[in-house]
Image (spheres, rainbow, N blue to C red):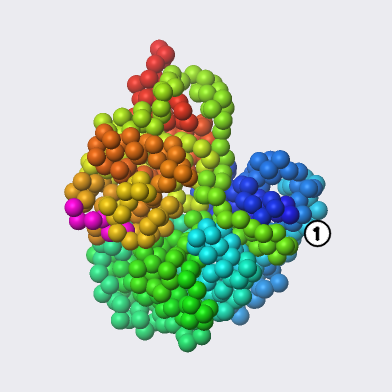
Amino acid sequence: MRVLGINAIFHDPAAALVVDGRVVAAAEEERFSRRKHGKRPLPFSAWELPEQSARWCLASGGLHASELDAVAYSFDPALCRPPDDLGLSDPWDWLRQEYAVRAPYFLADVLNGLDPDKVVFVPHHVAHAASAALAAPTSYGQGDCAVLVLDGRGERASHLAGRYRDGLLEPLATQDLPHSLGLLYEDLTVHLGFLRSSDEYKVMALASYGTPKHLDLLRELVSVTPTGGFHVGPVDFAALAPPRGEHDEMTEAHANLASSVQTRLEEVILDLAGWLYDAAGGPSALAMAGGVALNCVANARLSAQGPYRRLWVQPAAGDAGTALGAALHVARAGGDAVTPMPGADLGRGYTDAELEAELNRARLSYTRPASIAEYAADVLARDGIVAWFQGRAEYGPRALGHRSLLAHPGNEANTERLNDVKGREQFRPVAPMVLESRAAEVFEGELPSPYMLFVHRVREDWRKRIPAVVHVDGTARVQTVDPAVDPLTAAMLSAFDRRTGLPVVVNTSLNTAGRPMVDTPREAMELFGSAPVDLLALGPFAVTRSGAFDGLG
Ligand SMILES: [Fe+2]
């Protein structure tokens, strides 16, 4: 089957193409529209579709919209309920249902030749579940595992716990709205002066600066039920820390509140996962998705203390991933055997000739060193900052060595330096990438960790050697690099290791604050031109800072 997956309803619009059960392409609309998260998460924007990413997915698969067997849309309007029944305060929520009902016609309008009758509605959390359980590697129980979706909201629920057998889902528990761990965390995000459905990871980073002073109260307000769900009572954040404006000072009270909610979230996730383990008959593997599954501190705790032997989290765990999940679900339900996703690099990529043409068009001086991996390692070893643009762009919120900004981990000042390059808050940690074969020497916890979805304790004897990537609480959000999967980035790490004795490089996303990650060569050159980056490694080509301005004047 040829199935195009579409996520549009809440935020992070995205598209994915699955052909005969194989993931061909997946991309988020923000990388095309250059608008972070694609749109604001309001009912009024629910009609907006991932037009450009959907067209690109089709083109990359060599398909015309008329050749699709199905379009899988990750929201089912038939499951909607009036806002009053949901206990939500948004009187405009019904617009989502209205727009979803009309989505087949909107889609036919933007995808020439599409038959609107080919559009299939997939329940939002079934799409999340499939994005985890059907995309996971076989060694993590692909198609045969427990699945836990922890979300802000779907049509009427915020959570789904289930069991996959032979690629088919048996739901075991759902939690209806208004009770929602994701919405609780989003409300806290707003209270702390950050952006809803966008900055939740900043709250998680902030939590490590505080102590969970209000944990007893939160244990009363947020409780698990005996049927695998949970209740979230109204939490009066203002009674615990004053509401913070975007530019207000961040105080200890704010950090303590963040820490309290974070800690309670971790406890509840452990309980939910434990209930599911028993209800599902003790499967060895758990797959997770939903926005809350991007909480890598909670994931690490579940990995360490939960009952499962293996834990896999969909790298695009937020709503963007439902485009892929919806497509995989429809393919499997239609009888296709689905294969695990090959990696997160499912977006746009360019040939060497295309990259060189872009450099020439920009009239930039560049070289083609014998090995861009060795060249970049040289610059990094001399404490330069490298923009690393290689292969296909990542699907999901993390840069994983395809659109990355790299630096030396031994220079503590590089955290600040990278935050300055990107123009973002100084309490934000930057993360390490490490050769998979060396990871256990340096880090404790869930390994391998190819998608930066877990935090790891940095081993005591390594903390002083790689201070730039060690967070205030002694942890790091690690990406392990396997040479069999990503030979070029692994070669760069090996070359850096030979020069410095460190198999670790600082890795942060290739973007500046508030902007989506760089996707195209032109955007990479724009970033290079405007930020103090020493080397742009664009495929096999090298553009250096001084060289970038040769030929001027
Ligand atoms: Fe979702």
Residue bounds of the magenta highlight: 456-461
Q: Describe the element under mark 1 as helix, strand or loop.
A: helix
Q: Report if residue 458 lies within the magenta region.
A: yes
Vertical arrangement, residue 138 with respect to residue 170, above or below: above
The location of residue 314, given as percent across then percent down, is 51, 59
Q: Percent from the top left, x then y, of residue 542? A: 42, 25
In this orientation, does residue 239 appear? yes
Q: Quadrant of the C terminus?
A: top left
Count of marks placed on residues: 1
169, above or below 540, in the image: below
Quadrant that contains the N terminus:
bottom right
Quadrant of res 78: bottom right
Please give left or right for residue 546 compared with residue 83 in the image: left
- Residue at point 44%, 82% (across, down): 224
Picture residue at 35% right of the left edge, 48% below the top: 437
Badge 1 amino acid: Asp
Indicate whether residue 12 is drawn in magenta: no
Residue 203 in view in this figure: no
Residue occupied by mark 1: 117
Residue name at image x 61 percent, y 47 percent? 25
Name the residue: 31% across, 68% down.
259
Q: Nearer the viewer, residue 465 or 385?
A: 465
Q: Position of residue 352 (x, y in %)?
A: 54, 27
